[in-house]
Every structure is written in C-alpha cells, then in structure tokens.
Amino acid sequence: MRSKSVVSDARQVQLAAELVRLGARLQVLESETTLSRERLLKLYKEVKGESPPKGMLPFSTDWFMSWMPNIHSSLYLDIYRYLTANTPARGIEAIMAAYRLYLEHLHVHQLDNMLSFTRAWSLVRFFEAKMIDTAQCTQCGGRYVVHAMDLHRNFVCGLCHVPSRAGKTRKSTETLVAAVATRPALPVSGRAGTATRRSAVAA
C-alpha cells in the first residue's frame, strides 16, 4: 500500500504535467506545486520536448483591457466564476477546468485562442486581488472585465461599441458575438442582449 506522501508526490507530478500541457509557464508550476525547480525543469522538457521560455510573467492588468483580449478574458472569467459558484472546483483545479471549457467553447465557434493559460491564471489572481472586476454593459447586460478602481456607471462593452481600430470583419465579429452570447455564466439579460450586439456590429 502506498504511503500518503508518495501518493501526494505523484499527484504533484500529474498536476505539473497537466499544467505544462495547457501551456503554463515555469513560474506557474512553481507557484501551484510543491516540486523543486529542478524537477519541474526536467518534467517540462519531458512533456514539451523543449526548455521553458524565459522572462517574467505578465504583471500588468492593461493587457486584459484592449478590445479582443478583453472579450476573451471576460468569456474565460465568466466560465471560471460559474464553475466556482456551481461546482466543488476551487483553486488551480477550477482555473484548469475553466480553461479547458474556454478552449472547447472557442473550438465550437471556430475562433482563435487569444488567452494563454498563463494569462488566464494571472487574470484570476488579479481578480482575487481585487485589481480587476467585471462591469455590466448598459446596452446588452453582459459583464466584462474592467479595472476595479475605474468608474463604470455608463459602461458599454467592446461588442456593443466595436472600435474602428479593431480591424475585424463583420463576419468574424458576429461569430465572436455568438460565442460570447452563449457563454455558460452569462446572465439572462446578457443573452437577451445578443440582438443589441448584432445591431451594433451591423451599424
């Protein structure tokens, strides 16, 4: 019979491997597991067939506020919050489960992935640190990622008011609208706002 410590260590290795497959950076592995840096480096190379990328993790919330990243971040955070509110998933397990659902959602709607796992992990950390929050769009009723300290009284989301610099075709934007309108945790008012978003795109 295995000892508790051996089982725990095996689970740590499994968790680290799952994180690597999802695209987690080495710093995420160090933060979420109890394995040594040396073991993580070896495991990363075994799973990915290459050394982990160097450099610092994202430390600014500004990336999540630009048009396309904001929509994808809002979609992911809605899924994450839905899971934590309606399932036993917590912590890194919830982050991983939400990311897999996010990728499946994109696949169904044939959309490219704009949010890496490390970005998603950072987004949750920013949210839990109250640096990032969500605000309800006054036109469609959906909730979108915003800076926690900003004023959001007359907030309009990026799908109801698509910026000219977005450079997206009408077709791709409407596909994105459909993906966001069917996100798991979107309130009823947000679902009803799909027609509003389409009208804004067509304008």
Image: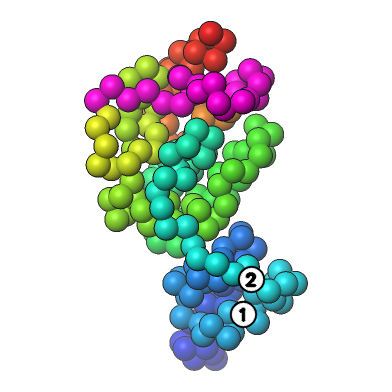
Percent x, y for residue 21?
Answer: 65, 63
State yes or no: discs 1 and 2 in contact (Cβ < 8 Å): yes
Would you say the magenta stretch is mainly helix, strand or loop? loop
- Marks 1 and 2, the one that precedes in the sequence: 1
Q: Is residue 83 above or below residue 15?
A: above
Q: Residues within 10 Å of mark 1 (few under 14, many from 20)?
A: some
85, 161: nearer the viewer: 161
Picture residue at 50% right of the left edge, 53% below the top: 119
What is the quadrant of the N terminus in the image? Answer: bottom right
Please, what secondary structure does the residue beneath circle 1 have?
helix
Picture residue at 37% right of the left edge, 17% below the top: 139
Q: Is residue 118 above or below residue 62?
A: below
Amino acid at the residue labelled 1: Leu
Q: Any magenta on residue 157?
A: yes
Q: Is residue 166 visible?
A: yes
Q: How many marks?
A: 2
Q: Is residue 125 above or below residue 135?
A: below
Q: Is residue 104 left or right of residue 59?
A: right
Q: Quadrant of residue 77?
A: top left
User: Range of the magenta residues?
Assistant: 153-174
Residue most toward the front? 165
Residue most toward the right? 49
Identify the disc placed on residue 41: 1
Q: Any magenta on residue 104?
A: no
Q: Quadrant of residue 202?
A: top right
**Which residue was labeled with disc 2?**
52
